[in-house]
Every structure is written in C-alpha cells, then in structure tokens.
Image: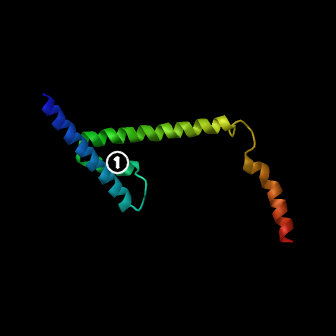
Amino acid sequence: SKQTIAAISEITFRQCDVFAKDLEMFARHAKRSTINIEDVKLLARRSSSLQRYINQKSEELVLNNQEKKEKRKKKNGTGKGRRTSDEQVGPAMAESEDSNMA
C-alpha cells in the first residue's frame, strides 16, 4: 500500500541520515575533515554482508587506482627510455650548488 511504501521510505531516509552523521563523527574523531573508506568500513561492521560487499569494492578501487597509476607512468614515457625531469636537472643542479658553496 501507499502507506507502507511511505513508511519504508521514511525509515530509509532516517537511517541514511544516521549513517551520514556517524560517518562525519568517525572522521571528526580521527581529526579529519574528510570521510574515507576506513570510516565506511567501520560503519558497516554490524552487517556482515554489507561489510563483505564494502571490502570487495574497496579492494576493486585499490586495484583500479594502481592500474591507472601504471598507465599514467607509461603514458608519460618514464618507461620508454626518456629522462625524467629529475635526471635532466640532476647534474646541472649539483654543479650550481657546488659553485654556490665555494
């Protein structure tokens, strides 16, 4: 019925509000202003199925981020025999530092 749907919706929105406040408090307790994945994992600790799901998604995010970093490294050419900016500046920088020391 419409009343049942309205009641379930109201409870769902209230629970989401509680979750949001809890996440904010977890981050604040850790002296952070940003909520991170560890806060979300802490929130899900009472529901084993939700905790498993969040852990799985967290691992997927870590893997995706690692893949993106590797692709960026390859795209920037650090693996193609090009010199990095550190290598290009390195020897000249050492000479100028030595001359300034004298």
Horizontal arrangement in the rendering, residue 98 relative to residue 63 (left or right): right
| 41 w.r.t. 26: above or below | above
| 42 w.r.t. 5: above or below | below
Q: Secondary structure at mark 1?
A: helix
Residue 21, position in %: x, y? Answer: 30, 53
What crowding class fits label 1: few (fewer than 14 Cα within 10 Å), some (14-19), or many (20 or more)?
many
Question: Label 1, on which residue?
Answer: 40
* In front of the other: 36 or 13: 13
Horizontal arrangement in the rendering, residue 3 relative to residue 14 (left or right): left
Residue depicted at x 44% and y 39%: 61
Residue 27 figure quarter: bottom left
| 49 w.r.t. 31: above or below | above
Q: Residue furthest top?
A: 1
* In front of the other: 17 or 67: 17
Residue 71, position in %: x, y? Answer: 59, 35
Horizontal arrangement in the rendering, residue 21 relative to residue 6 (left or right): right
Residue depicted at x 53% and y 36%: 67
Residue depicted at x 63% and y 39%: 73
Q: Quadrant of the C terminus?
A: bottom right
Residue 78, position in %: x, y? Answer: 69, 40
Tag 1: amino acid:
Val
* In front of the other: 32 or 15: 15
Residue 6, position in %: x, y? Answer: 18, 35
Residue 80 figure quarter: top right
Residue depicted at x 37% and y 60%: 28
